[in-house]
Image (cartoon, coloured by chain):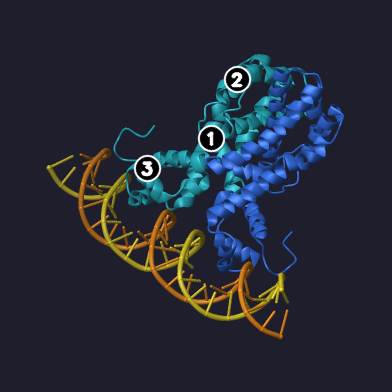
Chain colours: A blue, B cyan, C orange, D yellow
Amino acid sequence: MANESTRLTARDWAWAALKAIAGGGLAAVAVEPLARTLGVTKGSFYAHYRNRDELIEAALSEWVRTHGDEGLAEFAAIADPEARLRNLLTVVVQAVQPLAPSAHLSLLGDRNDPRVREAVKQVNQARLNLLSHTYRELGLSPERAASRARVAYAAILGLMHLAQTDPATSPDADALATEATKVFLTP
Amino acid sequence: MANESTRLTARDWAWAALKAIAGGGLAAVAVEPLARTLGVTKGSFYAHYRNRDELIEAALSEWVRTHGDEGLAEFAAIADPEARLRNLLTVVVQAVQPLAPSAHLSLLGDRNDPRVREAVKQVNQARLNLLSHTYRELGLSPERAASRARVAYAAILGLMHLAQTDPATSPDADALATEATKVFLTP
DNA sequence: GCGTATTGATACGGCACCGTATTGATACGC
DNA sequence: GCGTATCAATACGGTGCCGTATCAATACGC
């Protein structure tokens, strides 16, 4: 995760910032605490970024890059639309249970910041496009495909939400996955 | 909203804190800024609460009270389960578009705070219970009713997410509502 | 190996907020 | 109406963070 060299790069700081965001939102991106967790003093931070805002922007673009189209390539490569959809749903539903801190959810808390709003919007758009495209391939009209994609993606987001705020009550992932595919695979 | 009297009550402070949470999460609950927006100095705050943490707790319980069972009474009163479900879905889907700042979403950014986690959990639980109960009345087995309720409620939450971060792209509410009812009303 | 550019340490001033103390104003029971 | 409890203003010290300046250490091209 951290570079193996002893010296830090700008990207190391951006990743650390992303981790902090996942844990506590934008407010957790503070130069001095980050420096402490990285084992340096903040003096070195200002060799990489001009100020805290620049770090935030770097972290957000890093997140958009890895969670937008680039992170979707794996799924987009699946040729059969039904398999692709089933894959998307089950992977997401099952990935939902580990309490891995999610930057996405944390960023929702900072959605009033225009930079955050833009980043979240881009990631959402990339995913909605893939889903909508998939539903069209399954024979739905463009309008219904868009609506269905929206509802399905909303459900995915919401399941993340529930898993993170209430991990105990999560039913077993299998039941959820079959329920989700049943709901979102029928025309 | 604010008391008509010139003097402030503890609840006035709690409501102001909730508004601040909706706008910027827990970090926005700061005594001095709140005092400024309320038109007083912070000296008066400490006549109502011992410290900032107490205010946060008060605001969270206020939120749980108004958004948990108490806020659901209106829907729980609908006798016919199908009508109740249809009502829940359409009301939520249509209420989703105004960009009213939502405390629920803002609290996601602070879900690592145990008090926040507990509050969100309680509100979610109340709603899930109502939904699950409704699906049982519609004839689903307890297990399937629970899973279905979870997916449906997740979709509702996710639609909130999408509406708040990307209001422009929202398709017209009618299409969404019909899509949602079609998805979640079929057994 | 040497010099330069990059990374890190230390120290400082400034700001925003928390919490306390003290005193002033105002409502309300009696 | 009077006194007491409640709400509010002012002033203070303390803390955590930002950003700058300056100097030390280390990597890397040559």
Residue B144 at x, y percent in the picture: 79, 26
Mark positioned earlier in the residue sequence (1 or 2): 1
Label 2 residue SS: helix
Q: Amino acid at mark 2?
A: Ala
Label 3 and label 1: CA atoms lie apart by: 19 Å
| Residue holding disc 2 | B173
Q: Residues within 10 Å of mark 1 (few under 14, many from 20)?
A: some
Q: Tags 1 and 2 in contact by the CB under 8 Å rule?
A: no
Answer yes or no: are tags 3 and 1 on the same subunit.
yes
Q: Chain of mark 2?
A: B
Q: Residues within 10 Å of mark 2 (few under 14, many from 20)?
A: some
Answer yes or no: are tags 1 and 2 on the same subunit.
yes
Q: Residues within 10 Å of mark 3 (few under 14, many from 20)?
A: few
Label 3 residue SS: helix
Residue A91 seen: yes
Q: Amino acid at mark 3?
A: Thr
Of residues C5 and A53, the one drawn nearer to the viewer in this rendering:
C5
Q: Is residue A106 above or below residue B138?
A: below
Mark positioned earlier in the residue sequence (2 or 3): 3
Q: Is residue A179 left or right of residue B161?
A: right
Check residue B102 in the rendering and tell me which mark sits there, or answer none.
1
Residue at x 56% of width, y 43% of height: A115
Answer yes or no: are tags 2 and 3 on the same subunit.
yes
Residue B20 at x, y percent in the picture: 46, 41
Q: Tags 3 and 1 in contact by the CB under 8 Å rule?
A: no
Q: Chain of mark 3?
A: B
Residue at x 58% of width, y 68% of height: A41
**Quarter assignment of residue A10:** bottom right
Label 2 and label 3: CA atoms lie apart by: 35 Å
Q: Is residue C21 above or below residue A186?
A: below
Q: Nearer the viewer, mark 1 or mark 2?
A: 2
| Residue holding disc 3 | B37
